[in-house]
Image (tube, grey):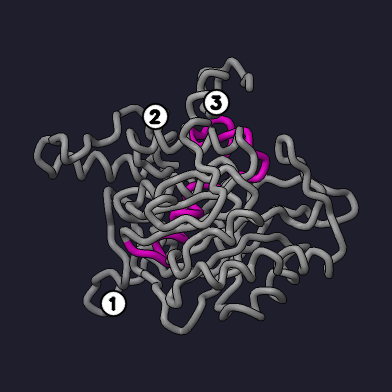
Amino acid sequence: MATSGSTRNKTITLSDNEIDIYSRRLLTPDGPVDRKQIQDRTICQDAFQCLRWLPEASVDLLIADPPYNLTKAFNTHTFNKRSGADYSDWLESWIKELVRVLKPEASMYICGDWRSSPSIHDVCSRYFKIHNRITWEREKGRGSKKNWKNNSEDIWYCTMSNDFTFNVDAVKLKRRVIAPYRDAAGKPKDWETQNSVNTRLTHPSNIWTDLTVPFWSMPENTEHPTQKPEKLVARLILASSNPGDMVLDPFLGSGTTSVVAKKLGRRFVGIEMDRRYCCLAEKRLEMAAANSRIQGYYDGVFWERNSGDQQARHATASAAAEPPSTPESPSPPPAGRRRQQELFS
């Protein structure tokens, strides 16, 4: 797929030769498979066919971004809008298959929008324990003269039981302190000054405003029309899984869940019916082996948007305080404001 000639366009593309190479790596089961066969693989198949063949109680975390209840083209496939009841039936047809695949301690996140969220809640409440609904600001969205601009989406957080993983310290957000209060002794109250900037680590809420959908100047961007940001998926994976856990995405798209799982030391399996998107996923996995950086997540912390300069100063200060890098200790990001913004914003 051709892209703009701009040198700042980082969109990941595929040549015909790459499609041929990456296609050979794809898995297409024709019967039951065990965990070793699917671990760290991309399955090119319809999820409705594949889920029944996955091993029982093999998945620690599910992240699902199914088609929302609207008519949308995904390369060679189109999902057609249907009634609320019919959409609920469609959701249940694959969600019920997951009960067998998920471990008793598993967690799951299912993405939706205002149209599909009622059906997601309805179906998930029949099979899982619902803990929360996360709403995140997409930033992009078409304006309307007769309605409110739609620029938010939902993520439903569920678990199989009351025994589950939630690593709250792994998903705290670093924010600038607007009102730096001090105690009676003059010491900062739950904040610190770092590189002349007052910051604090805050507990994650269910309203996320520090994200943006991938766009052409981001190195994770692809042609997929509903691609989620790596930063978003990283937050879900870090919160609800541990290193070595198996993460499943039955609607993989261009591979974000698998790529982030790889970067964060988790096992993964992704299912996607479109071969081109599967190949994009494989290319991104190959790229992740060489560069595990996640934009907006740096030094074990999630940073608010537009904090690139602050993160760059932190990187520079950290590098000055540490011994020279070795092959086991990656080098700090290269200097230069434009490059820093690209890496950290």
List the residue tagged with mark 1. Answer: 183
Mark 1 surroundings: few (<14), some (14-19) or many (≥20) residues within 10 A: few
- Residue 339 numbered tag: 2
Furthest toward the left, the residue is 323
Give the image quarter of residue 310: top left
The residue depicted at 9 percent of the width and 40 percent of the height is 323
Q: Position of residue 29 (x, y in %)?
A: 54, 48
x and y percentages locating residue 231 in the rendered image: 47, 50
For the residue carrying disc 2, how many other residues have a C-alpha within 10 Å: few (<14), some (14-19), or many (20+)?
Answer: few
Left/right placement of residue 14 relative to residue 200 reads right
Marks 2/1 in contact by CB < 8 Å: the verdict is no
- Dot 3: what SS? helix
Q: Which amino acid does label 2 sit on?
A: Arg
What distance separates the C-alpha of mark 1 from that of mark 3? Answer: 61 Å
How far across and how far down the image is residue 298, in percent?
A: 34, 48
Question: Residue tagged by mark 3?
Answer: 19
- 34, 262: nearer the viewer: 34
**Mark 1 or 3: the one toward you:** 3
Image quarter of the C terminus: top left
Q: Is residue 238 magenta?
A: yes
Q: Is mark 2 on a helix, strand or loop?
A: helix
